Amino acid sequence: MTSQTLLCKMDKDIKLAHSDARARTGPRVCGNRPPEGCFVMRKEKISSAVIRRLPRYYRHLNDLYRAGTVRISSSALAKSMSLTASQIRQDLSCFGGFGQQGYGYNVERLRSEVAEILGMNRDHTILILGAGNLGRALIENFPFELNGFRLTAAFDINPALVGAHVAGVPVYHMDDLEAFLRDSPASVGALTVPGRVALDSARRLCACGVSGIWNFTNVELPAQELPGVKVENVHFADSLLTLSYMISEGHI
C-alpha cells in the first residue's frame, strides 16, 4: 500500500468515526458558541454547594433586574455578593456559557436562565400539612407564586381550622389528604406538623406521589422510608447556632 493510499484510507476512517459519533450523540443544536438565549445543560453531577448558591444568584439578579440594571461583570456581581469572580464563573459554567467576554452578563437573560435551572417556570404545586402557627405564617407571608409554586391547600385536625380559609387557602381535614391528592396531585408537601407525626405524615405524602417534602418539623426524615422523594430539611436553630458560634468565637 502506497503512502497516498494509506492517507486516503485514514481520512476515510476518521470521517466514518465522526459520522458514527454524530449518529450516537445527535445533532449539536447550539454548536461551539451558543447563540443568545441558547441554554446548554452540562451532564456532570452538580455539587450541592453550587445548587445551594443558585437561589442566592437568582435573588440578587432579580434585585438588579428590578433596579433596571442591564448588564453586569462577573467582578461587579462577585463584589456585591461577597464572592469571587472566579467562583461565579465556575458555578455558572456548570450549566453552560452565559457571559460574553468584554461585555459581562445580561442581567435579564441570566436571571431567566437561573430561574429555568431552578425549575421556577414549571408550574409546581405545594400544599401544607399543619395549619397552626408556623403553617399559618407560611401561608400568610411566604411568596409562593414569586418562587414558582402555587399553594393549593392546607390540612389540619383542629376543628377550629378545618373548613376555614387562611389568606384564601382552604383548610381540609388530614383524613381527606389522600382523596385530595388523587384529584389534585401536588409537587411538594410542606410539613409544619408536630414532630411526633412527622414521619407518618411524610409517608402519606410519599404514598400519594409527591416529588418533594419541605420539612419544618425539626425531625430528620430517613431517606429509606421515603423512596423517590427529595427532602429539604429546614432547621431554624441551625442558622442561629451558627451565628452564636461566630459571635462567640473570640471568647473561646
Image (cartoon, rainbow, N blue to C red):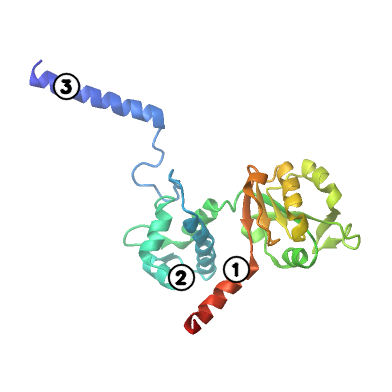
Q: Is residue 104 visible?
A: no
Nearer the viewer's eye, disc 2 or disc 3?
2
User: What number is the disc on residue 238?
Assistant: 1
Task: From the top left corner, tell me how far across and down residue 51 is, in percent.
Answer: 50, 56
Task: From the top left corner, tell me how far across and down residue 145 is, in percent.
Answer: 67, 58
Which residue does the numbered mark 2 point to in the structure image? Answer: 81
Nearer the viewer's eye, disc 3 or disc 1?
1
Task: From the top left corner, tell me how far across and down residue 247 is, in percent.
Answer: 53, 81
Q: Mark 3 or mark 2, which is nearer the start of the sequence?
A: 3
- At label 2, the amino acid type is Met
Q: Residue at x 90, y 63 (%)?
A: 160
Give the side of residue 24 with respect to residue 116, left or right: left
Q: Residue at x 22, y 22 (%)?
A: 12
In the depicted structure, whether residue 19 falls above or below residue 172: above
Q: Residues within 10 Å of mark 1 (few under 14, many from 20)?
A: few
Q: Residues within 10 Å of mark 2 (few under 14, many from 20)?
A: some
- At label 3, the amino acid type is Cys
Nearer the viewer's eye, disc 2 or disc 1?
1
In the depicted structure, whether residue 75 falls above or below residue 211: below
Q: Mark 1 or mark 3, which is nearer the start of the sequence?
A: 3
User: Given contact means CB atoms under 8 Å apart, are the residues at marks 2 and 1 in contact?
Assistant: no
Quote the CA–CA distance across marks 2 and 1.
22 Å
> Relative to the observer, which residue lies in front, 51 or 202?
202
Quote the CA–CA distance across marks 2 and 3.
57 Å
User: Given contact means CB atoms under 8 Å apart, are the residues at marks 2 and 3 in contact?
Assistant: no
Pick out the residue farthest to the left.
2
Quote the CA–CA distance across marks 3 and 1.
67 Å
**Residue at disc 2, secondary structure:** helix
